[in-house]
Amino acid sequence: MRELADIRVTIVGLGLMGGSLAGALYGQCRAVVGVARRAETIETALARGLVDRGTTDLADGVREADVVIMATPVRVILRLLAEIGPLLPAGCLLMDLGSTKAHIVAEMARLPDHIQPLGGHPMCGKEVSGIEAADPTIYHGCTFILTPLPRTSEAALVLGHALAEAVGACPLVLEPERQDYLVATVSHLPYLLACALVGTADATTSADTAMWEIVAGGFRDTSRVAGSDVTMMVDILLTNRGEVLKALETYQAQLGDLARLVEAGDEEELRTVLSAIREERLRMFR
Amino acid sequence: MRELADIRVTIVGLGLMGGSLAGALYGQCRAVVGVARRAETIETALARGLVDRGTTDLADGVREADVVIMATPVRVILRLLAEIGPLLPAGCLLMDLGSTKAHIVAEMARLPDHIQPLGGHPMCGKEVSGIEAADPTIYHGCTFILTPLPRTSEAALVLGHALAEAVGACPLVLEPERQDYLVATVSHLPYLLACALVGTADATTSADTAMWEIVAGGFRDTSRVAGSDVTMMVDILLTNRGEVLKALETYQAQLGDLARLVEAGDEEELRTVLSAIREERLRMFR
């Protein structure tokens, strides 16, 4: 395996995730090149010391890359995968940071043979977006899911691990379908229920000015991810629709059960159910 | 109005909220007395410097109090209200920290005439409980809802304001029904939906060991309040049942709308709705 210090990495998309990744790799690789649509984004990335070089020209940015990492919304990744192949040098490792993996890995399977594809999904983020919000430390301690294809070489997977570890993350290899199933509940469902909570307040209590004085920590935390980037989330929901809908169905049933217990005033059962849930929550985040 | 420094305050219930309040008032009043069921709780409160004196005897604890603040679960407050009247000296201000107010204020209206009742609800907390978790700073910057009764004197309300401000909170006077309506959406609903989220993971993904490696910030924040004290929450849900059920109904409709948009793959409408929600979330926590 080549040393990280010998490797030229190109990151396509310099938003929160791509800009942060660039900054986390900056100085550890032979070069970190950023590709963005807007020249101002590149100026910001250069000024903040996140990249060695930047360009708005995809072909120019990836021409000499040993590793290319696509850090755009999922459906932009899918479009890039259809066109990027001929632009990449032989043996190039092509990764992505998309939150859903089955569609992306299926598209990666159609890449030209001279490319080593590897799906990636770091389990971190913020409810802010853009290069201004980039923070090279956001990968520290997070799990970085890797979804190799049957054609992915051992060396490419080892390099993927090394890149994840270089930014402070813990790599975890998963099958794409298993990752999509898990992430639907762990990440996409919390987004939708945070949105429904904000929608509820918007439809009712937010007309009362006192609401704005009393929104407390519980509401703030439970609704936080409703502030996530909409373009990113729409792509995620539409490319993981089946798993998201199944998770939603289970969730609605769970909530319906709780509502029935409250309505019935069934104190004993309510206490039993809520205690079990509390124990489970404590077990999850000990 | 009497100066805070002349006032003897007794806090009944030395859990997270009562212990924190005692610690926040300690040194600012003539005396802070704690009443708890268990002698060990009082020992801890004394050792941590949260109270001047402690007792397990309610009558002893409140006999000389100028202010008594009930910091127990809501239904314990309701039981205390039925028996505490004859134990209190004339002119005593009797407050509480309960999360629901209509039932409590109705019960307060039946207190003997020599008592000044005032409902209270500080909009803060943590998902841990007990005197060990007490933190005198948790009231800093929070809104402290006050629900006076028609019989509450101006002087008693002014003293309630002074106590809230003394612990760093911002007092806000609300009618009990209005507070219960608002808090159902702002506080009780987030609890139930966090519980349903944990219940969903428990019923599905948590059987997969990888789930435990990938639970990320979104899930952690959205589910945080599911770790709240169950006895406290059962009392809250059962004494604010009507408002909680109405908020749940609106929430289920909101979530159902989002689910239908995802199912239909209606990208344009999904983007419109999620963008409006994101804007609303940003407006709430600017």
Image (cartoon, coloured by chain):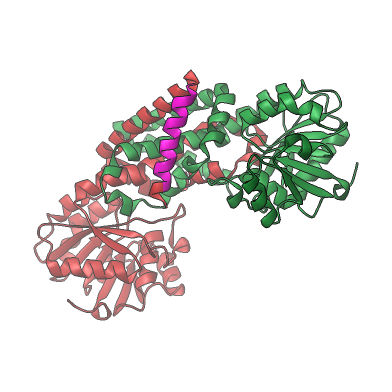
Chain colours: A red, B green
Residue B1 image offset from top left, x and y in percent: 91, 41
Q: Which residues are magenta?
A: A266-282
What is the quadrant of residue A86 in the picture?
Answer: bottom left
Left or right, B66 with respect to A7, comes to: right
Residue at 54% x, 28% y is B237
Q: Is residue A205 magenta?
A: no
The answer to whether residue A141 is visible is yes
| Residue at figure coordinates x 59%, y 25% from the top left | B239
Above or below for B200 versus A256: below
Q: Position of residue B244 (x, y in %)?
A: 54, 26
Magenta stretch: includes residue A269: yes
Measured from the top left, where is residue A261 in percent x and y?
45, 23
Q: Nearer the viewer, residue B26 or A135?
A: B26
Q: Tell me what residue is drawn at x 41 percent, y 29 percent.
A: A255
SS assignment for the magenta stretch, majority: helix
Q: Quadrant of residue A77?
A: bottom left
Is B113 placed left or right of B196 in the picture?
right
